[in-house]
Image: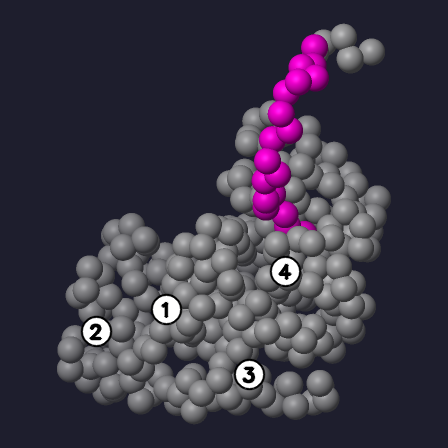
Amino acid sequence: MFERIFTFNSAAETPAPLHLRKGVIIGAGQVGMACAYSLLIQDCFDELILQDIARERVEGEVMDLVHGMSFITPTLLKAGTVADVGRDADIVIITAGAAQKPGESRLNLVERNVAIFQNILGDVVKFCPNAILLIVTNPVDIMTYVTLKLSGFPSSRVIGSGTVLDTARFRSLLAKNLNIDARSVHAYIIGEHGDSEVPVWSTANVAGMRLLPASCPDSWENLSAAERKELTAIFEQVKNAAYEIIKRKGYTSYGIGLGVTDIVKAILHSQERVLTVSSLVEGAYGIYDICLSLPTVVNEKGVLKTVNLALSKQEEKQFQNSAFVLREVVNQLNL
């Protein structure tokens, strides 16, 4: 009945084919849907596929989002899998996994989530062989490494969300104390996305002005007790933020959804952004064959290069310890 609305010009030329930006999110829980919502309202993809083992629920999520398409730049949104409508995606975002329980560390999730990934990755490799894989599932550094080994993809195309959110939290708390916009604070959290993560105080700055005096980057001993207490309190808030949120609402979602969107935009638009994503470390600070977060240049190829931070001796030891913590877990997986 709708044919009467339009008159078609049979002589019109067929337009040249466009490369449509296509993404898949595997795992449509709280985190997956926060990613989907953020990606949609920021017009990241032309086509987005949501995949979840709970097929009926994900269909409901798609219906709900589709009803709001007239309010945003439209995206073709579907429920499906990489084996059907998700084939040849540019980016596959994996958020699927067991939920983190109150009081549970991210590393406790490893065994449950490795089994889930073993079931997921076969189809991803088969049907999206040229995709960039963006891992969000915790413990994200371990799961990024697991994905790298199970997929056989080049390390440049396997990226974890890493400490992107931790870095954002760090900058936000520093900005609050300084009473300035968080985007004007340049400071990083590196290493594990978890309990062994490292605040890089030695290079933290605002407009090139270091937060620590020039005499202090190598030792806290040069700071007063009050200054050490203040900085430690800020970092503890960063490190424990997820635990505090989970204790209150049961999960975290919005922050990581926005962080994932930042990574996706850096890839799709080849922005060459410096982001603290997790990727394979091969030689930095004497560390090899483990996935950790460092400031990393991200473009359409995925990981392009990492920034060589001039860490203090203390920070370098902490970063190496973070690698050791993760290596101990990886060694038990027999990958």
Residue sitting at x 40%, y 59%: 272
Type of the residue with mark 4:
Ala
Q: Position of residue 325 (x, y in %)?
A: 55, 86
Would you identify the image quadrant in which residue 141 lies?
Answer: bottom right
Query: Which numbered marker is on residue 290?
Result: 3
Q: Please tell me whether mark 4 sits on a helix, a strand or a loop.
A: loop
Distance in Å between CA atoms under marks 4 and 2:
42 Å
As drawn, the label of residue 131 is 4
- The spot of residue 120 in percent (x, y) is 77, 65
The residue drawn where x is 53% and y is 70% is 156
- Mark 3 neighbour density, 10 Å: few (under 14) some (14–19) many (20 or more): many
Residue holding disc 2: 212
Majority secondary structure of the magenta segment? loop
Looking at the image, tell me whether mark 3 or mark 4 is earlier in sequence order.
4
Name the amino acid type tagged 2: Leu
Tag in front: 3 or 1 = 3
Q: Are marks 3 and 1 in contact (CB under 8 Å)?
A: no
| Mark 2 crowd level (few <14, some 14–19, many ≥20, 10 Å Cα) | some
